[in-house]
Amino acid sequence: MKTIGIIGSGISGLSAAAVLALNGQKVVVFEKNDQLGGRMRQFEANGFTFDMGPSWYWMPDVFERFYKQFGYSGSDFYELKKLDPGFQMITADGETVKIPAGWDELLALFEQIETGAADKLKAFMREAEYKYEVGVKKLIYQPGLSVLELINADTISGVFRLQIFSSFSKHVRRYFKNDTLIALMEFPVLFLGAMPKNTPALYSLMNYAGLKQGTFYPMGGFKKVIDAMVQISREHGVEFNTAEGVDAIKKESNSKISLTTHARSIQLDGLIASADYQHVESKLLQQKDRNYTE
């Protein structure tokens, strides 16, 4: 058994902690805040409760795949409600466009905005669903150690349909001409932290998730998801340390990693830093271990 440290108790840190513990490792989580959850924690004041971060629950099958590893389902922890409308978009000229949960209603909306757009949306979604099946259900579970992971039977046979090297922005404009529809189809990739022109068309899979699968909400707030992951982690022996921020990370000559917090120093066999990359890179790592300059 190895001791693995995890910095941050957001959804990435918690999922990593649970999976590592499931696979027999001793896991210690360090969280600088008093409350677990990272950006998915909650704020309470004057009888009201607010989600601090995410407000849309997309790709429910990804969550279910996670829970299934531990013998659970999401319904064991919270009620998931499909929203209708899923969300609304306010255009540059102030028009409000509500996105319906029903597929037929969505097709009608597209047709109302641009003649022929309903059939174009059907064609767009057929390709997006294929990308979702290959990308979300297979590619994202690769460890990310080599570009060769992208070369398999699915990607080779469907290399043109996956559009890994095509621009998302150009892809959308092959189907739609109306500015409102283009804006609606392009906005999901902003969650990736990139502009549509610089994003591969592969990510039309996010349109499939948001528009075809729909937008959900865990009743009680996103902390319900955090509570579920914390419960699973604790059931497998994960140790949580709140109000204990990390000050420094140092590689030792004995292949150990030395972690210095506000309260102590601890030696670890491995470390996952799920705090903000820029903070870890420029504040916690020693200069010689950094990948980037300021």
Image: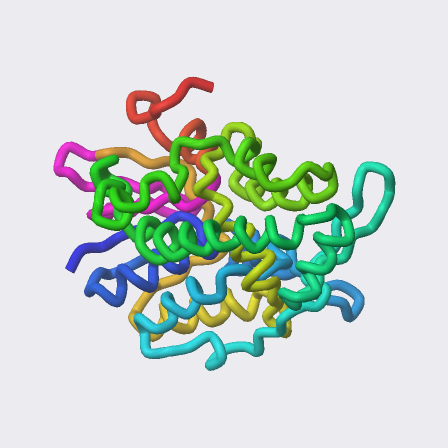
Any part of residue 50 in sight: no
Q: Residue at x 21, y 46 (%)?
A: 152
The outermost residue toward the top is 293
The outermost residue toward the left is 254
Find out whether residue 123 is within the magenta segment. no
x then y, percent, for residue 20: 27, 60
Find out whether residue 259 is within the magenta segment. yes
Any part of residue 87 in sight: yes
x then y, percent, for residue 262: 44, 44
x then y, percent, for residue 258: 27, 40
Q: Residue at x 59, y 70 (%)?
A: 218
For this view, does 229 lie left or right of residue 83? left
Q: Nearer the viewer, residue 34 or 195?
A: 195
Q: How is the image coloured?
A: rainbow
In the figure, residue 182 lies in which quadrant? Answer: top right
* Segment tinted magenta in the rendering: 252-276
